[in-house]
Image (cartoon, grey):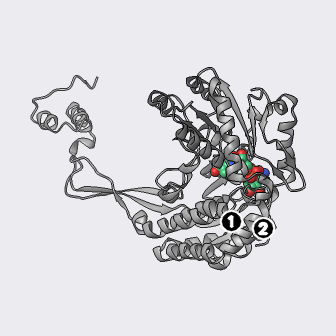
């Protein structure tokens, strides 16, 4: 697709016209696009995995776990559930609505724009695309320029599997993004930083376009001093794989920092040292099980965090950085200053600060004194603490005794609250996000209530009151003149 404004406008006009033909509303069209996506994932798995290796150094197993496999799962669900999702849902009316019925009918929004990020370049582009086509929309997808091999595969190969009159992939960076944002859309779905999220929202305001913002932030994990050594080991393993084993910590729901009780920190650090070796080898760089930092700019950002003297002093595990290879060893910090950049900015890399508190219960206050996170992870069996976290904290998701796993559960909506964004997707939530649930009501001509029509009388007012209260006996009594309201017309 050409990128001049005129060419873009021409293309979008033809996509809109195509949408107007009603073709994308057919279940058969939606099924064929889901099938196309399925074929793309299955037939091009090797190229997908290669692109992920090239752009991000992701291991094949990680690429399958986080992108290929999850997309297959989502496509299977969408294909299996499509007819059910598309069906109108009855809306129950009270008995007083005699000979009336109501339903919710999902309809597509029209032409939607999806702008995605680079850390899960296929997942973050195709998960929303699946929802958008299942809901019958036409779509323009702009992947991130920061994962160029993945973006190129999406722009050149994916369209050969899809209906190009309805679905376009446009490559480019901020300039292309801004060009796209000037256009009128029926929905914008954005994954990325809060800074660009603000640009997206301002542009959307011009056309009153609804937006979904999937942003980031600092996700805390609190780790209670679990009493059984088995539990401690499981917790340590789960933390390490969620931090270092998912795009090297470059994930919006990766653990950003850990809160522990004072006496437990050295025990946790020792455990993690052992398990880092077991999982990622004596020399993690050579084992190729940890992804690379996406580019030099991100590498330097992380390096700068770590070169702050007090932060550097706090390194207790790892710390080596290889600029040529954009590799940072799994690094653990113990009590870096709370006012350091690493503790105020989103880390988005394989560096894990541990902050010690007097008691683990203090983590509630610690978390609440910062912006609402996308996820909170709590490794604790303490039921009282679990209850407090549930009722006293707010976050996009809350997971007890594990991390990141909530992302793959189709029955859980994925999205933020507060500064980490708004709008929820995954599974049926994606279909709903890209649909308008139209309220449809049907009435018969046989029945009606005389008291809804002027001229107004006190009795009509009384009947309205008992009707809204669904007080059926009251209606009868008011009609018979046996019940009076305290209201008057004066
Ligand atoms: P980014 O905001 O720099 O870029 C995201 C997308 O926006 C890219 O496609 C980019 O080309 C485009 N873009 C950049 N400038 C633009 C502009 N001026 N106008 C229009 N489009 C523009 O973010 P990033 O570096 O890709 O991702 C990092 C951030 O995204 C982190 O904060 C991370 O937490 C967040 N993130 C969130 C999720 C989530 O699901 N919630 C997933 C991945 C990343």
Could you tell me residue 385's position as x and y percent? 49, 28
Instruction: Name the quadrant of the N terminus.
Output: bottom right
Q: For mark 1, what is the residue?
A: 60
Res 118 label: none
Q: Quick one: which residue is furthest to the right in this view?
A: 324
Give x and y (percent) for residue 162. 62, 76
Q: Is residue 308 left or right of residue 385?
A: right
The nearer-to-camera label among 1 and 2 is 1
Q: Looking at the image, which residue is at 13% across and 28% down?
A: 483
Find residue 73 and report its horizontal and vertical position in percent.
52, 65
| Relative depth, front residue between 477 and 140 | 140
Considering only vertical position in the picture, is 130 above or below 397? below
Q: How far apart are labels 1 and 2 at the CA level?
A: 16 Å
Give the image location of residue 185, x and y in percent.
64, 59
Question: Looking at the image, which residue is at 62% across and 20% down?
Answer: 358
Q: Vertically, is 233 above or below 223? A: below
Which label was assigned to residue 149? 2
Q: From this view, report whether residue 166 is shown above or below residue 147.
A: below
Question: SS class of the residue under badge 1?
Answer: helix
Q: Quadrant of the C terminus?
A: top left
Earlier-in-chain disc, 1 versus 2: 1
Query: Which residue is outermost to the top?
Result: 358
Q: Could you classify mark 2 by the number of other residues whose Cα lies within 10 Å: few (under 14), some (14-19), or many (20 or more)?
A: many
Q: Nearer the viewer, residue 100 or 156?
A: 156
Residue 202 seen in the current view: no
Asked if the residue at tag 2 contacts the one at tag 1, i.e. Cβ–Cβ closer than 8 Å, the answer is no
Q: Is residue 8 left or right of residue 321?
A: left
């Amino acid at each position: 697709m050409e990128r001049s404004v005129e060419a873009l406008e021409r293309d979008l006009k033809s996509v809109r016209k195509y949408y107007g033909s009603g073709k994308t509303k057919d279940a058969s069209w939606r099924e064929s696009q889901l099938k196309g996506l399925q074929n793309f994932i299955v037939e091009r798995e090797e190229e997908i995995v290669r692109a992920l290796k090239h752009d991000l150094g992701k291991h094949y197993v990680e690429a399958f776990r986080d992108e290929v496999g999850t997309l297959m799962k989502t496509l299977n669900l969408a294909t299996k559930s499509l007819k059910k999702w598309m069906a109108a849902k009855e809306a129950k009316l009270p008995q007083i609505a005699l000979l009336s019925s109501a339903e919710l009918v999902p309809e597509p929004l029209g032409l939607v724009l999806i702008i995605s990020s680079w850390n899960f370049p296929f997942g973050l582009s195709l998960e929303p695309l699946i929802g958008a086509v299942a809901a019958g929309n036409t779509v323009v997808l702009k992947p991130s320029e920061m994962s160029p091999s993945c973006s190129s595969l999406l722009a050149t190969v994916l369209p050969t599997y899809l209906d190009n009159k309805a679905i376009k992939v446009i490559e480019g960076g901020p300039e292309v993004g801004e060009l796209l944002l000037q256009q009128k859309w029926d929905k914008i779905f954005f994954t990325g930083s809060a800074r660009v999220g603000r640009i997206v929202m301002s542009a959307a305001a011009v056309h009153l376009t609804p937006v979904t913002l999937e942003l980031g932030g600092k996700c805390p994990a609190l780790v209670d001093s679990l009493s059984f050594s088995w539990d401690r080991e499981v917790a340590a393993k789960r933390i390490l794989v969620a931090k270092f084993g998912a795009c090297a910590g470059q994930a919006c729901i990766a653990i950003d920092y850990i809160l522990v009780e004072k006496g437990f920190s050295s025990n946790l650090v020792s455990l993690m040292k052992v398990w880092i070796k077991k999982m990622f080898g004596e020399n993690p760089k050579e084992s190729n099980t940890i992804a690379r930092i996406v580019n030099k700019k991100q590498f330097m950002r992380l390096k700068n965090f770590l070169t702050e003297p007090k932060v550097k002093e706090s390194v207790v595990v790892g710390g080596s950085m290889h600029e040529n290879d954009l590799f940072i060893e799994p690094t653990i910090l113990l009590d870096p200053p709370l006012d350091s950049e690493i503790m105020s900015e989103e880390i988005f890399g394989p560096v894990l600060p541990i902050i010690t508190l007097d008691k683990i219960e203090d983590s509630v206050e610690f978390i609440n004194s910062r912006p609402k996170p996308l996820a909170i992870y709590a490794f604790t069996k303490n039921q009282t603490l679990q209850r407090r976290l549930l009722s006293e904290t707010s976050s996009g998701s809350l997971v007890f005794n594990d991390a990141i796993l909530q992302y793959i559960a189709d029955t859980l909506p994925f999205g933020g609250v507060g500064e980490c964004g708004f709008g929820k997707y995954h599974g049926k939530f994606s279909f709903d996000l890209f649909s308008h649930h139209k309220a449809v009501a049907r009435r018969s001509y046989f029945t009606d209530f005389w008291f809804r029509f002027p001229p107004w009388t006190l009795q009509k007012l009384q009947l309205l009151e008992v009707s809204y209260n669904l007080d059926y006996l009251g209606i009868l009594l008011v009609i018979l003149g046996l019940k009076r309201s305290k209201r008057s017309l004066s």
